[in-house]
Image (cartoon, helix red, strand yellow):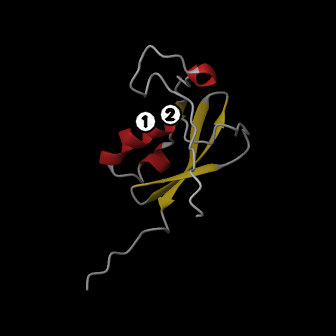
Amino acid sequence: MDGTPIFDIKPYLPYADCVPDARGGFADVVKNYALDVEIPEIYLSKLPEEHRECVRQILAGDPRPSYQNDPDRVYGMEYAGYEIKFRVKDCVLTVCEIGQSNNRKTIRRT
């Protein structure tokens, strides 16, 4: 605002940045695992078939904040107009609800 430069300092990520043999320090640790995903048929049937595999892959990647690990907490995410709620316990993600999202944006033409 007053002409002072702003420095945006981030860790170097060798797997994502342009010098692959560089060292990333604390950022070298890459989360490389997948959760087992259980979607009961009663919920899976609410998703169109063309979205099911993508939702399963997103959930397997663990969309929770990395600092959260409460097996009793219900987490949620939105995908393709659906709200998906789930719990995670012992590396198993279990979907406990799927419904239409209330956050659909309406496009108005003038």
In this view of the protein, which residue sits in the foreground, 28 or 5? 5
Residue at image x 55%, y 41%?
Answer: 63
Residue at image x 45%, y 39%?
Answer: 58
Provide the residue designation for mark 1: 57
Q: CA distance from mark 2 to mark 1?
A: 6 Å
Q: Label 1 near label 2: C-beta < 8 Å?
A: yes
- Tag 1, which secondary structure? helix
Q: Quadrant of residue 27?
A: top right
In this view of the protein, which residue sits in the foreground, 62 or 65? 65
> How many labels sit on residues?
2
Q: Is residue 106 above or below residue 52?
A: below
Residue at image x 70%, y 38%?
Answer: 67
- Name the quadrant of the C terminus: bottom left
Residue 82, position as x, y percentages in the image = 45, 58
Residue projecting furthest to the left: 110
Binning the other alpha carbons within 10 Å of mark 1 as few (below 14), some (14 to 19) or many (20 upward) gives: some
Q: Is residue 96 left or right of residue 21?
A: right
Q: Is residue 106 above or below residue 10?
A: below
Q: Quadrant of residue 54?
A: top left
Provide the residue designation for mark 2: 61
Q: Is residue 71 left or right of residue 31?
A: right
